[in-house]
Every structure is written in structure tokens, then in C-alpha cells.
Image (tube, helix red, strand yellow):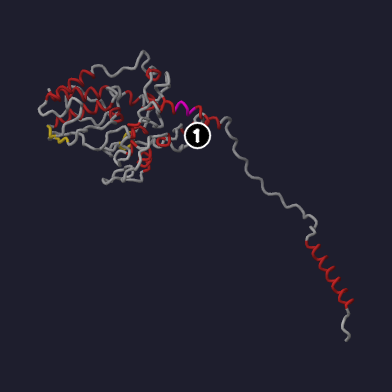
Amino acid sequence: MKPPNKISYLIILISSLMILGCTHDTEYIPGPAGADGIDGIDGHDGVDGVDGSAAVCIDCHSASHRGPINDSYILSAHGSGSSWARGTSATCAQCHNNQGYVDYLSGLFVNENGIQSAHPDGYAVSNPISCTGCHSDHRSFDFVNDGNDYALRNIAPVSLVLDPNMVIDFKNDSNPLGTSNACITCHQPRPSYPIPAGTEDYEITSSRFGPHHGPQSTMLEGVMGAIITGSTGYPGVGAATHRSGASCISCHMGETTDGTDGDHTWKPTLNTCVSCHTSMTSIPDGIAGLEEDMATLKALLLALDPSPLLETDSTVPGTYPANIAKATWNYKTVLEDHSNGIHNPEYTRALIKNSIEALQ
């Protein structure tokens, strides 16, 4: 067979290129559009929003609302340096350190006695209580039906650290949601010393004997004083009008009069007082006669030999008869309450007057 010549090779090559060119072009030519698919099933209609619902959030979550809050907060004792001075200590951090307070409420930590606490190891830095300490997440956004909890970290009833079996729940008509329960977490006696009771001698082991700086909630409730039988009767637990008809929030966070009281200063305002005490023209310094009774009780304690009290109100460690220890506890409790009896007038009078009788 005769081999193909150069012309035959050229014809074969050109034919091959033409075939390849046609194949390449065919691969990238789109075909005609297909028929439309079947329509999907309609989704469910959403619920219409409430007109102005965003405004409800903006009422609080805006610079114009937060500005006055920040201004009033820095005037409060909570915002001052002394309130977080001891916040590195494990035993103090739950009230004197922002992170310690958050950790305490988390329920994740217990101390060596198995009692709920802040982190048992303490903290390298003590940070001031801030917005994020007291406030976290709302439990509901349906404020109309569920009430506004102001995103407080705790509004549940509080078991007291001095006696976990005793629970305080500051709910009433003025505060149906119990937002005042947030205050009880810190404003209660610390568990350093048991309340004097019975007739046995009592050993005072520290110059800081007493309910520390926070018996406001227990005074309002009418509990945790040292009961001494006397001519002045004790009111029922929770019977004080400020307990049954008012609350921490309603009295201490009212509308400000001049920017230096109410709101987040927590200083009571006359505006709030006159809503119940309609004839009041100024906020009283304390209940009638208490200043004189406190002076009398202090003088009786100082006159004892040995005395359980110093002129500076510090206590003197030692072992004392039960009534002397009780009277000292009651004096320190009313002193540390700082309301001068206004939180619970009848209970305050009973504690002090019966202590005076016991020493006389």
C-alpha cells in the first residue's frame, strides 16, 4: 500500500481541527429555558407588631435615659470608693466587688462551710458595683402582663446568710414583682457572729461585733434583733407599715427633687414621702425619742465594769452576761441600720427600751 503524502496529512489535520472546534462550541451553547416549577406552599402570616413597641425599649435603653442615672449613681454610697475597698476578700466580695456579687448570685460557689458565696479564692482586683452588677437580662418583655423587672439579677425571695432557714420576700402592692429583693442580698447581717440568745454568758471575740453595716432588710422585716423580755411589746414579723405598704424601691428610688436625691442615689425624697404622709413638709431625721434612748443605752453600757462598748461605739472583746451581750447587739443593730428607727419604729423602740430596762 502506498503511504499517504504530505497533502493527505494536511487534509486529515484540518479535518480534525474542524471537528474539535465544533465540539468545543457546542458544549457552551445554552439550551432553551425549561418550564417553570410548581409554586411552593404559602408560609404562615407573622403576628403584627405592637405600635410603638420599640419605644418601650428606648424608654430605658437610650443615652437620654441613662445619663441622669449615671449622674445620680456617682452620688450614692454604692458608687463611692469605700464600697469596694474590701472587695478582694472572699468573704466581702459578694457585696463589695462587682464580679463577686455576680459570682455569688450565680450559685456556682460555696465556702468552706458549704454556704453560697463569691469565689472562695477571692479576687486580685476589686471593681465597683456597676450597672452590670445589679442588672443582666429581662425575664420577660411583656411588661404589661408580666411586670417590668428592670433586668435585675435577682428578684426572688432571699435566704439570709445568718440563718439560711429564714427567707425574706419583699413583695406587696407597692412592689408586686419583688424588685426590692435585689437589695436584701447585701443589706442583711453578715454571719460573723451569732445573735445573743438564751441566758448563758456570751463571748464577744471582735471589736466589730454586731450585724456589720447592713441590717436594713432585717430591721424592716422585724427580725434578728436580740429579744429581751420587757414592758415594750414587739410587733409581728413583717407588720411595719413601711414593710407592708412600701418597699426599698418605692421609698429610696422616687422621683428626684433636685438631682441629688431619689433615683440611683437611693436617698429618700419628700416627693415619695408625701404620697403617703400627706401632711409631711420635711423628711424626719428619725423617730421621736430614739436619739435620747440610744444615748441612755450607750451610757448604761459604758458604765458597766467591764464595759462591752467604747465611746467610739466599738465593742470590747470579752465574756459577758446574756442581757449585756443582747443589749450591745441591739444598740449596734439600730446604729448600723442608719434609718434612726424609720424602717420599723415599733420594733426599734422595743429593742432599745427593753435593753435599757434590762441594764437598769
Residue 193: name its quadrant. Answer: top left
- In the visual, does 200 lie left or right of 261? left
Specify the segment rendered in magenta.
65-69
| Membership of 322 in magenta stretch | no
Image coordinates of residue 77 in percent, x first then y, are: 35, 28
Image coordinates of residue 15 in percent, x first then y, are: 86, 71
Q: Which residue is mark 1?
A: 142
Residue 109's place in the image compared with 274, above or below, is: below
Q: Residues within 10 Å of mark 1 (few under 14, many from 20)?
A: few
Image coordinates of residue 291 in percent, x first then y, are: 23, 19
Residue 160's place in the image compared with 249, above or below, is: below
- In the visual, does 10 lie left or right of 311? right
| Membership of 66 in magenta stretch | yes
Figure label count? 1
Residue 209's place in the image compared with 29, above or below, is: above
Name the foreground residue: 94 vs 53: 94
**What amino acid does circle 1 point to?**
Asp
Q: Quadrant of the C terminus?
A: top left
